Amino acid sequence: MKSPLSNINTNEPNFFEQVYEVTKLIPYGRVTSYGAIARYLGTTRSSRMVGWALNGCNNTSEIFIPAHRVVNRNGILSGKHHFSGSETMKELLESEGVAVENDKVVDFEKLYWDPNKELL
């Protein structure tokens, strides 16, 4: 099976680094989606690649990247299994005042941060 990472063009600015830079801008106590980051970066159809970028980013990066603030388009903690414990993503969000029930952000629409609106 071909790795999705093999499609990255190394002659262009590093996509993963771009994802990390946007993710670092998500305000404390707010969330965004993989798709919103992809759209902001001009790669609308690369939500999954955003997820790949965030998968384990804090295991290799010296700078903390708040990947726990990125959820799927419905506010579901779809990336929770990439954290050190099954409840880590939820706990990090709750420590910022974000309520989570049944692995879904409560008040998702209210807490949603759209880089396409906030960073332009």
Image: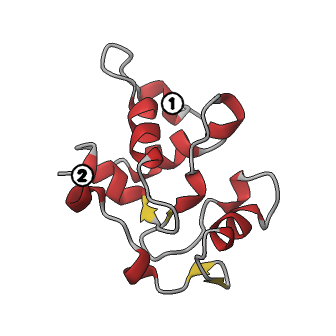
Residue type at mark 1?
Answer: Leu
Colouring rule applied to residues: secondary structure
Q: Mark 2 points at which residue?
A: 119
Residue at 52%, 39% (x, y): give it.
53
What is the crowding at mark 2: few (fewer than 14 residues within 10 Å), some, or many (at least 20)? few
Name the secondary structure under disc 2: loop
In this rendering, the answer to whether 66 lies above or below 106 is above
> Which residue is more in the foreground, 23 or 36?
23
The quadrant of the rendering that contains the N terminus is top right
Q: Quadrant of residue 68?
A: bottom right
Q: Is residue 35 left or right of residue 74?
A: left
Residue at 47%, 68% (x, y): give it.
30
User: Which is more N-terminal, label 2 or label 1?
Assistant: 1
Q: Quadrant of residue 101?
A: bottom right
Q: Quadrant of residue 12?
A: top left
Q: In this view, does 83 lie to the left or right of 52?
A: right
Q: In this view, does 44 lie to the left or right of 102?
A: left
- Residue 73: % across, % down: 42, 70
